[in-house]
Amino acid sequence: MSDRALRAATQVLAENWRGTYTVPAAGLYPHQWSWDSAFIAIGLRHISPRRAQQELDAIFSAQWDDGRLPQIVFNPRLDVQYSPGASFWHSERIPGSPAVPTSGLIQPPNHALATLLVHQSDPETSERRRFLSRSYESLLGWHDYLEQRRTGASGLVHIVHPWESGMDNSPFWDAPLAAIGASFGSDIPRPDLNHADASHRPSNAEYGKYLYLAARYRDHDCDDRDDAYPFILEDPAVHALLIRSEWAMAQLADLLGADSAGHRRKARELTDALESLWDDELGCYVANDVVAGAKQRFRTVSGLIPLLVPDLPRTDELLRTLSSEHFRLGGTALVPSHDLTAATFDSARYWRGPSWFNTAWLIAEALHERGFSDAARALATQMADLGLDHDFPEYVDPHSGEPRGTQRFSWTAALSLDLYE
Ligand code: 9WN
């Protein structure tokens, strides 16, 4: 990597650092986000393994009694800058919440994988700070929450809000949201539109449903016991990240001299369960609406992320789909979030087409782990180049590579440091 690229990425990460964690972007996202911090830590380890550890420490210190790691840890002084904030959630009123104000929802479980990579980058500092043993305890609680409280009869992990997928307006959620008659009402705060073009963001109609679901989950004390709750989905990327993280837990257990067999067994069980989301005709995994009992048959980047799962029976098919006209690996900017040929594809709007850097990293990591080193390096180099050329955008138009959303975005800068050199 060139000195200029290293300096530019380091500068963004320094600007967005808040003493113990990094905000995703100064204006649009002024708090700490859960899966962002794990991706940021993966990049930060190349410039400061200690800061990478602190980034993860900060999210672990906001863990709920039931083990969940919250979607967002709020800075209450910036309440009006982001909606819904601390004053919407009032997490201090919910039994089992931590001392700091948080959202009650979760995000995808990439934390054990990040913990392993951060530890491996500087085992000495990690040992001195007891990073591994402390993190492992938190991760055990986090995975227990997902595998006990959030797993249904299918053996697949459940999400209860589009935000929990990290891919908020994916076409996967269109029908499940449309089936919910209620909405939050017409007075929908949109501070996000002060920082990004409305045509790059989810619509007001979607926000009405997002806030309705969040308020309903909150008003039921976030206890996962609302029998008539209307949004329960199984998402391939969330489930695949849990599997990949369960394999990372096995490695962490080995490093700590703890029992790793249970983690390997669990990872295999979770991998067997994933098979029910396979769609032969589409050549990828799809989401399942548990409430309606209906598969959401779209090709999205979420359905390709299982490539990260070791010993996956569908690797060849997924690689074919990734290179096909639907995602055009190598022939377009990064990996589009949605099928380039679909009627629902939109090259500008958030998770309905634009290419994101975190999902590109997950695919690059999967290619690297499968031994496709050249393809992994090519994708990582493209990420680094696009990041540097466009001031580290949140996402890009897959056809033109033009920046969309906000800029000086932390995970874009962080992951551009991970080049498989
Ligand atoms: C809601 C912070 C987050 C990412 C998500 C991305 C976006 C939030 C929002 O920003 O979601 O969590 O306000 O739109 O979809 O993946 O973690 O960067």
Image: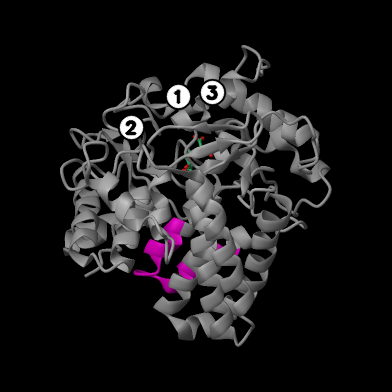
Give 99 or 183, whichever is nearer the viewer.
Answer: 183
Q: CA distance from mark 2 to mark 3?
A: 18 Å
Residue 22 in view here: no
Height in image: 342 above or below 144?
Answer: above
What's drawn in magenta, residue-wise? 39-57
Say whether disc 2 or disc 3 marks the residue closer to the N-terminus: 3
- Is disc 3 placed on a helix, strand or loop? helix
Query: Looking at the picture, does residue 398 appear above or below residue 256?
Result: above
Q: CA distance from mark 2 to mark 1?
A: 19 Å
Residue type indicated by callout 2: Gly
Rendered view: 366 above or below 296: below
Of circles 2 and 3, the one toward us is 3
Sort mark 1 into few (<14), some (14-19) or many (20+) by Cα contacts within 10 Å.
some
Read off the residue under disc 3.
175
Q: Secondary structure at mark 1?
A: helix
Residue 216 image position (x, y, % from top left): 74, 29
Label 2 environment density (alpha carbons within 10 Å; few <14, some 14–19, many ≥20): many
Task: Give the labeled residue for mark 1.
Answer: 193
Does 226 lie within the magenta span?
no
Mark 3 CB within 8 Å of ligand 1: no
Camera-side residue of 114 and 61: 114
Residue visible at 48% across and 72% down in the picture:
116
What residue lies at 63% left-to-right and 62% top-to-bottom? 60
